[in-house]
Image (cartoon, grey):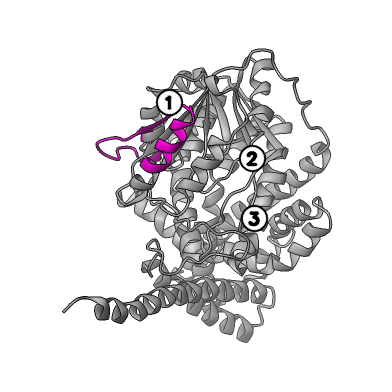
Amino acid sequence: MFAELVSFCLRAAYFVAAALLALYGLNALVLTALYLRTRNQSPVAPPEPEAWPTVTVQLPIYNERWVAARLLRAVAGLDYPQDLLEIQVLDDSTDDTSQILDALVARLCARGLDIQIVRRPERAGYKAGALQHGLGLARGELIAIFDADFVPPPDWLRRVVPHFLVRPRLGFVQTRWGHLNEAYSLVTRAQVLALDGHFLVEQTARNRSGMLMNFNGTAGVWRRACIEEAGGWRGEILSEDLDLSYRAQLAGWEGLYLPEVEVPSEVPPTVAAFKRQQRRWAVGSLQCLLALGRSLACASLRPWQKLEGFIHIGGYLTHPLLILLLLLSLPMLALRVPLGWHIAGLGLPSLGPPLLYAVAQACQGRCGWARLVHLPALVLLGTGVAASNTLGMVRLFLRRENRFDRTPKFNLNGRSGRWRGRGYELGVDASVACELFLALYALAALALAGARGEVYALPFLALYAAAFSFVGLRHMWEGRQSRGRERARQPVRRAARPL
């Protein structure tokens, strides 16, 4: 009787997790179909206005010594009426980034540009706190935002701002992220596939099909009145961009996505940096789900819009679901509970995300098709970060994870530049031990599935083993590279000291 109860509970848990994962996979197929249906429905570019509105460009910066000057020079080169452009450098830095900014801002101000450096006594609310603090000092009716790793082209404002003048309820505009260092490594090439899938397919499909979309935190413009009416930036939520964009749309404001307007940016060059970025986004999206779930459920939206909104905000829940499936597989195999029909149900839905990424590249022509050779690396990377993201979510519930950890940037372009020895490297953390444990766990389940004749389970378990091994071992290798380089420099510094 006890064995039957255990078997029933395992089956039920596995079925629920697999069904939810299948829902996310099917949603990727739906978004791909919607993109193909709407990809030629680009909004007509409005004519240039006779009178341009005042724009404040906010640059939230925290310890960005390698890229802060590059960003500021690009923003200073924006083609916009000089008397209507204000630039706020929201500097929370604790290293020599502040000295770099002071020197450059002094030179730019001498050219007649309106640039202010805004510094707070403490970093309360992290990036959201800096944006909210700067908003109280800004004079612009439109607020543009750029993170430190972005390089906006000169005509960017002139292509975005006119949309606000012809749509009174337009609250924010998001533009597409480009990639400065796509060719830097296998890790960056894999990330580009994921980013293109989001910015070319998902954002386009949601925005043009009447669904709620999100502001991506940078390379966008907000109407000041929208920010204020929606309640402003909230520093207690790590994904402050997702939070504000949903609150704004639930309050009746509109969002607009312009995939044809691109802003180059730097992709995290290491697995460690990518994991930190994804963990922050995963924790932040879960916070948004908890904070906005009731408002979304009660909103005056169609049922399919609400469903898509929940799937969107809860997208990172796929990672704990993946971990749960893996952990359940070994006891189910040991108790001879068949896995085949459970896993078979994931077959078609599991093709959703890869197909979405493939369509995003195929629509870019020959260069896009060439990038698809890196799709297996994305599958490994995307699955392998599930452990780190799940740990972050667990810590959130344990009230130990609510810190905004910045993603380090190193001023990388193409294949040039280096991240080692530049002061912002990330070491090995507890997530690596978890990844290596899960890789061994998957190998044990794989061996048992082979012995039990569970053929359907073999590809999925092999993917788990490969993904967690790839991410964990790559993170360890990066940490060893950083330490080795630091040790190699130490004797030189000691020898150079005066006796």
Name the image quarter holding residue 169: top right
For residue 3, above or below residue 360:
below
Which residue position holds label 1?
A: 232
Is residue 4 among the parts visible in the rendering? Answer: no
Query: What secondary structure is found at the residue carrying circle 3?
Result: helix
| Mark 2–mark 1 distance (CA, rounded to whole Å) | 28 Å
Judge the density around disc 3: few (<14), some (14-19), many (≥20) Cα neighbours within 10 Å: many
N-terminal-most mark, 2 or 3? 2
Name the image quarter holding residue 82: top right
Residue 82 image label: none
Range of residues picked out in magenta: 102-129
* Residue 251 in picture, x, y percent from top left: 53, 20
N-terminal-most mark, 2 or 1? 2
- The image quadrant where one finds the C terminus is bottom left
Which residue position holds label 2?
A: 153
* Residue 186 in picture, x, y percent from top left: 62, 69
Q: Looking at the picture, which amino acid does disc 3 mark?
A: Ala
Q: Looking at the picture, which amino acid does disc 2 mark?
A: Pro
Which residue position holds label 3?
A: 194
Is 345 included in the stretch rendered in magenta? no
N-terminal-most mark, 3 or 1? 3
Query: What secondary structure is found at the residue carrying circle 1?
Result: loop
Task: Name the residue rendered at 47%, 54% in the picture.
Answer: 277
Q: Nearer the viewer, residue 213 or 113?
A: 113
Judge the density around disc 2: few (<14), some (14-19), many (≥20) Cα neighbours within 10 Å: some
Judge the density around disc 1: few (<14), some (14-19), many (≥20) Cα neighbours within 10 Å: many
Is 112 included in the stretch rendered in magenta? yes
Position of 420 with respect to 348 (left or right) is: left
Task: Name the residue rendered at 69%, 73% in the picture.
Answer: 456
> Marks 2 and 3: CB-CB under 8 Å?
no
